């Protein structure tokens, strides 16, 4: 009996300690985001549940938030802030909360999650949004994830420091290792085995900085009941490893992104005797540095060709890769992108997909259905042949700033999946390439996890408007209903941009990376802009973001009309009209730049200065500056590849880069007409490519300070362009 009591006592003490960790983590988050409420809200643990759950209840002038873990408690807090305080926590750390002074009384409310896995991020997010982040950025972002119930974030920061230690053990020098890595903004594509060396070598100070940062990231994520998804070895090796191990079966994975052959990546065959030792060294070193939660993002063959397409080879490769993980971590689970099955569908036949994913033991591979607003892979794979999967909304490519998102269609698809995809549908996620754009879409997707059934989208958007701005406003609500049925009835896709951001051309939109097509009437956006400006406006950063974002999209859409009129004048050889329309085009771009200068989130200077701030020496600062400028403009090698894929409508970028290109174009077209010659597109392309490259390496100071008259400037721009846009035929 004495030992039984001792065991019970020990178990109770352990439970109390575990519960207190949850409460402490949730309380700490509250103190960071809303310190004024820290003494008025109490967190309590609920017993272990099969589903994540939270409860809210007011007692004795206190709000009690209960949850089965810290993450559920944070979701409960966010529900209270959104639905009782009309407060929306932005993913921008500089958007301050405006809380009611009095704590609102809550009737008892309980909500279960419909799925227990909530994934977030994309390899590409670490290049298009997060490469220059410090702990201050990460800390706010992790809190935002917790508030939105995300509990499986991709956590790949700092892995180069791990690999540096591993490759040294296999005989490579520091110089060889750092030359193998790409520049910071391009590391996602190195990590996915698409390119090596490009924009390297990577400074040692970068490796050290990111190693320290990742330790903080995974510690905080675990405090908030998240499972950081760490990487595992998938076969990507330095080409130079062949010189150390001549018998190793190492092959090129081929061309990617129109890069020169010297930037190709290399793959070690899973059956090679070197594979398991590399996996062992990597996972052991990573675990020593960052710990593990046993879930590993492992993505061989992403957008590249495997050594063989034979189903038998794919079976053996998957089995061997998974087995190599279990030799180090017997609890290993493999998280695999299904993007490859969508992107190379013509190669990934049903037989090949089934062979690859069912080769891993049941429930030990989880598939991310990556781009469900476009193509739901679960539908043509019999729900991934029984393997667990997570339905994901992608929503953004390259961090481009186009307003887009098919909200009503996402509701239909997601609800259908939740109800009909089967028990192996275990989660909801988002795999966005860049963020800071179209926040409504991502908050909707994660809000959906904590709903009971079908969502009334129109009502949800009305509620979004109320909590986003702090109180109901009929004009704002009408504006958002217009946006729902225009920009947010128009799905996101690869290569979106207003024509302002495209390489200049007389027709079309330059390349596939800058598609300016819109599936709605620009007048609807103009009317939404007007309603926002006529509402009971306030000076919050959130409102200023929205009104400016709508305005710049309206002007960007209008630019296409002016370009087409310019082209018509060229075809008619009308020099007067060419001059006039050319001036109007440049005026619109300059006005967009001025408008965007009113909000910190649209400033090129912040992107560049954040990159430079990581540098220790002047040469490192210059290196990071060029890397930061290249990824959002030329992207790859001079005149080749993914030019403009990560285009942004940002103040500073429009005036110094996009408008400068259009100015060259307008000048050359007018000169050609004056000389009675056809416009020489090839000569112009060479001229513009030279300009682009010179801009990337040029040192130029861009403002990091927003102008103070946001609403005044928006009203002035609206008044200037309203009649012009309404009169477009």
Image (cartoon, grey):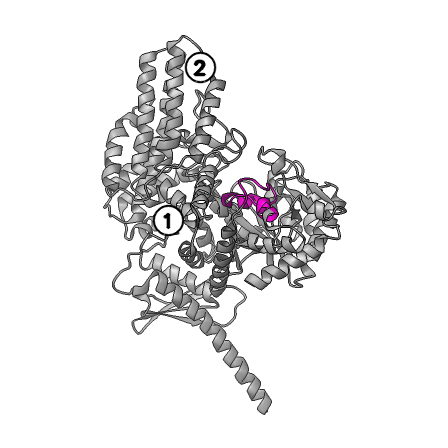
Q: Which residue is mark 2?
A: 679
Classify mark 1: helix, strand or loop: helix
* Residue 670, placed above or below residue 107: above
Rendering coords of residue 277 (x, y %): 70, 56
Q: Are marks 1 and 2 in contact (CB under 8 Å)?
A: no
Magenta run includes residue 181? yes
Q: Crowding at label 2, few (<14), some or many (≥20) Cα neighbours within 10 Å?
A: some
Locate residue 567, reporting x and y percent.
40, 17
Give the SS element for disc 2: loop
The quadrant of the image that shows the C terminus is top left
Residue 529 vertical placement versus 581 (above, below): below
Q: Nearer the viewer, residue 76 or 593?
A: 593
Q: Which residues are magenta?
A: 176-201
- Residue 318 position within the rendered picture, expressed as x and y whole percent measured from the top left: 70, 50
Q: Nearer the viewer, residue 536 or 611?
A: 611
Left-right relation of 373 to 719: right
Q: Look at the picture and state if 578 lies above or below 531.
A: above
Q: Which residue is mark 1?
A: 459
Question: Left or right of 11: which side holds 436?
Answer: left
User: Extreme top residue here?
Assistant: 676
Q: Is disc 1 surrounded by few (<14), some (14 to 19) or many (20+) residues within 10 Å?
A: few
Q: CA distance from mark 1 to mark 2?
A: 52 Å
């Amino acid at each position: 009996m004495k030992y039984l009591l001792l065991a019970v006592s020990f178990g109770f003490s352990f439970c109390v300690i575990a519960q207190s960790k949850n409460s402490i983590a949730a309380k700490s988050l509250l103190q960071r985001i809303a310190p004024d409420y820290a003494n008025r809200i109490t967190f309590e643990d609920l017993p272990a549940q099969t589903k994540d759950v939270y409860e809210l209840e007011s007692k004795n002038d206190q709000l009690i938030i209960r949850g089965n873990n810290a993450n559920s408690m944070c979701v409960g807090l966010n529900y209270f802030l959104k639905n009782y305080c009309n407060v929306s926590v932005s993913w921008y750390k500089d958007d301050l909360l405006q809380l009611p002074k009095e704590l609102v009384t809550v009737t008892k409310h309980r909500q279960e999650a419909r799925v227990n896995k909530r994934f977030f991020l994309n390899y590409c997010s670490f290049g298009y949004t997060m490469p220059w982040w410090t702990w201050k950025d990460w800390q706010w972002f992790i809190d935002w994830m917790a508030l939105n119930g995300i509990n499986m974030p991709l956590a790949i920061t700092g892995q180069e420091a791990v690999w540096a230690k591993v490759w040294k053990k296999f005989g490579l020098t520091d110089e060889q290792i750092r030359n193998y890595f790409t520049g910071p903004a391009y590391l996602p594509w190195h990590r996915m085995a698409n390119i090596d060396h490009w924009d390297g070598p990577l400074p040692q100070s970068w490796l050290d900085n990111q190693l320290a940062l990742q330790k903080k990231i995974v510690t905080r994520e675990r405090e908030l009941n998240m499972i950081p998804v760490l990487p595992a070895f998938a076969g990507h090796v330095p080409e130079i490893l062949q010189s150390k191990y001549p018998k190793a079966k190492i092959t090129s994975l081929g061309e990617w992104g129109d890069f020169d052959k010297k930037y190709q990546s290399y793959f070690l065959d899973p059956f090679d005797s070197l594979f398991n030792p590399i996996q062992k060294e990597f996972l052991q070193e990573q675990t020593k540095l960052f710990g593990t939660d046993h879930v590993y993002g492992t993505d061989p063959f992403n957008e590249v060709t495997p050594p063989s397409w034979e189903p038998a080879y794919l079976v053996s490769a998957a089995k061997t890769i998974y087995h190599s993980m279990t030799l180090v971590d017997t609890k290993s689970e493999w998280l695999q992108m299904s993007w490859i099955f969508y992107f190379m569908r013509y190669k990934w036949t049903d037989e090949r997909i089934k062979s690859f994913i069912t080769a891993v033991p049941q429930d030990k591979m989880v598939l991310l259905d990556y781009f469900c607003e476009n193509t739901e892979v679960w539908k043509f794979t019999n729900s991934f042949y029984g393997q667990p999967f997570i339905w994901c909304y992608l929503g953004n490519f390259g961090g481009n700033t186009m307003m887009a998102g098919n909200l009503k269609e996402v509701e239909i698809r997601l609800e259908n999946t939740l109800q009909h995809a089967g028990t192996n549908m275990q989660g909801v996620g988002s795999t966005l390439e860049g963020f800071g754009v179209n926040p409504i879409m991502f908050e909707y997707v994660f809000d959906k996890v904590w709903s009971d059934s079908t969502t009334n989208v129109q009502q949800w958007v009305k509620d979004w408007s109320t909590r986003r701005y702090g109180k109901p406003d009929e004009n704002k609500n009408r504006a958002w209903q217009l946006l729902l049925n225009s920009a947010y009835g128009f799905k996101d896709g690869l290569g979106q941009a207003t024509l302002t951001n495209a390489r200049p051309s007389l027709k079309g939109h330059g390349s596939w990376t800058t598609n300016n097509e819109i599936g709605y009437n620009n007048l609807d956006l103009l009317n939404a802009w007007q309603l926002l400006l006529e509402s009971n406006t306030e000076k919050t950063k959130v409102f200023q973001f929205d009104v400016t974002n709508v305005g710049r999209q309206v002007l960007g859409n209008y630019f296409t009309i002016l370009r087409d009129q310019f082209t018509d004048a060229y075809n008619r050889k009308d020099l007067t009209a060419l001059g006039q329309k050319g001036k109007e085009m440049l005026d619109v771009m300059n006005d967009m730049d001025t408008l965007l200068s009113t909000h910190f989130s649209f400033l090129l200077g912040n992107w560049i200065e954040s990159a430079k701030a990581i540098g220790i020496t002047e040469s490192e600062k210059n290196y990071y500056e060029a890397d930061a400028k290249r990824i959002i403009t030329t992207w790859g090698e001079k005149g080749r590849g993914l030019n403009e894929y990560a285009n942004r409508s940002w103040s500073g970028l429009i005036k110094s880069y996009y408008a400068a290109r259009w100015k060259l174009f307008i000048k050359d077209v007018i000169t050609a007409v004056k000389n009675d010659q056809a416009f020489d597109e090839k000569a112009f392309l060479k001229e513009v490519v030279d300009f682009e490259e010179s801009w990337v390496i040029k040192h130029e100071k861009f403002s990091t300070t927003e102008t103070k008259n946001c609403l005044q400037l928006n009203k002035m721009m609206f008044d200037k362009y309203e009649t012009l846009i309404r009169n477009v035929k």
